[in-house]
Image (cartoon, coloured by chain):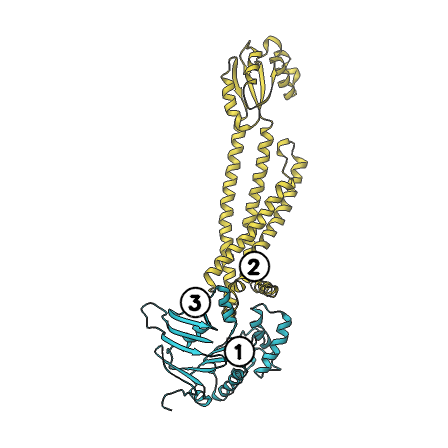
Chain colours: A cyan, B yellow
Amino acid sequence: MIEMKGVSKVYHTGAKPALQDINLKIDGGEFVFLVGPSGAGKTTLIRLIFCEQAPTSGRISFLGRDTSTYKPGELLQHRRRMGMVFQDFRLLKSKTVFENVAFALEVVGRSPKEIQKRVPLALEQVGLSGKENAFPGELSGGEQQRVGIARALVREPLVLLADEPTGNLDPDISRQLMELFDQINRNGTTVIIATHAWDLVDQMQKRVIALEGGRIIRDEQRGYYRNEH
Amino acid sequence: MNINSLRYCLRQTSRSFSRNKWLALVSASMIAISLGILGGSLLAAVNTNQIMINIQSNLEMAVFLVEDADQEAIEAQLDGLPGITDYRFVSRDDGLREFARSLNAQSLFKELEGENNPLPDMFRVRAAEAELVPELAQKIEGLAGVESVEYGEELVDMLVRVSRWVNRASLTVSILLAAGAIFLIVTTIRLSVLARQEEVSIMKYLGASDWFVRLPFLLEGMLIGWLGTLVAILVLGAGYFRLAAIFIKEAQLFFLQPVTAAEQLVPIFLGLLILGTLMGGIGSTLSIRRFLKV
């Protein structure tokens, strides 16, 4: 589904590349952890997959299509097939839970009827039924992130991208969210998560791609956060 | 962009407008003032133009003849000059009577009749356009039997100069005010952008198109411009027609009749409305370009 060949990313000419010679292939339906120290290139990799940025060199293809050949409309379509989850949730404080999730449908021009149908389903999926009218400020961090996940899911994306989704949450809540991601993955969505939560990575026994200094140093199925295991 | 998106954008526009009400109103007032002045000067220009036309179409040259000039020979030569619409011979006796009548003092001039009449014979000559008058006057002055030619040159010159000066001054002022108004719109829209910055960054991640992000801001600016101009037009229109009514009633001079024809006024008001809306659009476009990274 996603394939990278010899991908590098340099933000400023002369600076150390954020990513160097990345070669990887992620199939539809996979669950992938991106691990590594801060500055290893995890976030950059997610940005490249989202097509928020273009690689400095190399080729990224999505569903067999070279992303560098996208026309502007296709670039939007690409992003609309992805759901993005953030460490800081990025919810709109002035909107209710329902409105935050509905926002993902509004910005792509879906009808009010469709919004009324889909938002409750997404909220049910993340276990937030009944919280529709709450404002983010009234929710716990874990609940807020569930809203973020519901917003990413409501358009039924092919790929769910999450950058440190549990970075601001305590371990119990983090574990519950990882279970939620696993459940979403079992429903067929490809899930790619950049994380520092080594204990959860070790528990989940999923594919682990480890980055360091912008290079892939390890890529194993049913992997661990560290090599020593 | 489909109908749902458009509806969403319109909702955002009105929300943003009401959130920034006061600054939006100040910007709109600036637009109103600058376009009010521009509109006022356009109306003044239309009217001075009309006055010029009125005067021009009645502008006569007085061609004074030497004693015993050959009237028929001069008539033949006047016929040969292009740009003359008509002419009329006034004998010195008729001239005296016209003069006396115009002063309403016929009895006073009794003594000057006959041999004592100081006036020469003359032609009254009308030109097609005022602009032709100076040149024609010069040519006629060169004809045999013509003593001198007079026309209301000071009046015409003054009228041209005054209207030019008024136009330039009001154009300068309107341009300065318009620049100020656009700057205010930039600021207003900038505040809207700042207020919605987080929303905009999220919209990008949710796959909103650039136009979807920009349109509410663009519409907000255009709305401000449109509203401001609308106010300017209403005030200007009401003031103008009131003033015009006074002139029509009071002004004795035929050439001071104000322009009230719709075919002359409607394009001015319509043009102002388009200009004001455009100014709003320009302001928000500048603001979007500078402050909105999409």
Which callout, 1 or 3, points at the residue further toward the start of the chain?
Answer: 3
* Co-location on one chain, circles 2 and 1: no
Q: Which chain carries label 2?
A: B
Secondary structure beneath label 1: helix
- Chain ID of residue with mark 3: A
Q: Position of residue A13 (x, y in %)?
A: 33, 67
Q: Nearer the viewer, mark 2 or mark 3?
A: 3
Label 1 crowd (10 A; few <14 / some 14-19 / many >=20): many
- Residue at image mark 3: A68
Name, please, the residue furthest toward the front. Answer: A64
The amino acid marked with disc number 1 is: Gly
Residue type at numbered disc 2: Leu
- Residue B182, percent from left and from top: 50, 54
Mark 2 lies on a secondary structure that is helix
Q: Give x and y (percent) for residue A176.
A: 52, 87
Q: Examine the rendered structure and indicate whether residue A37 appears above or below residue B58.
A: below
Question: Residue at 59% across / 30% down in the picture?
Answer: B55
Say the numbered circle drawn on residue A148: 1
Q: Name the residue under label 2.
A: B219
Q: Mark 1 lies on which chain?
A: A
Q: Residue B28 carries which label?
A: none
Q: Where is residue A135 in the image (x, y as percent from the top left)?
A: 57, 77
Looking at the image, which residue sits at the far bottom? A229
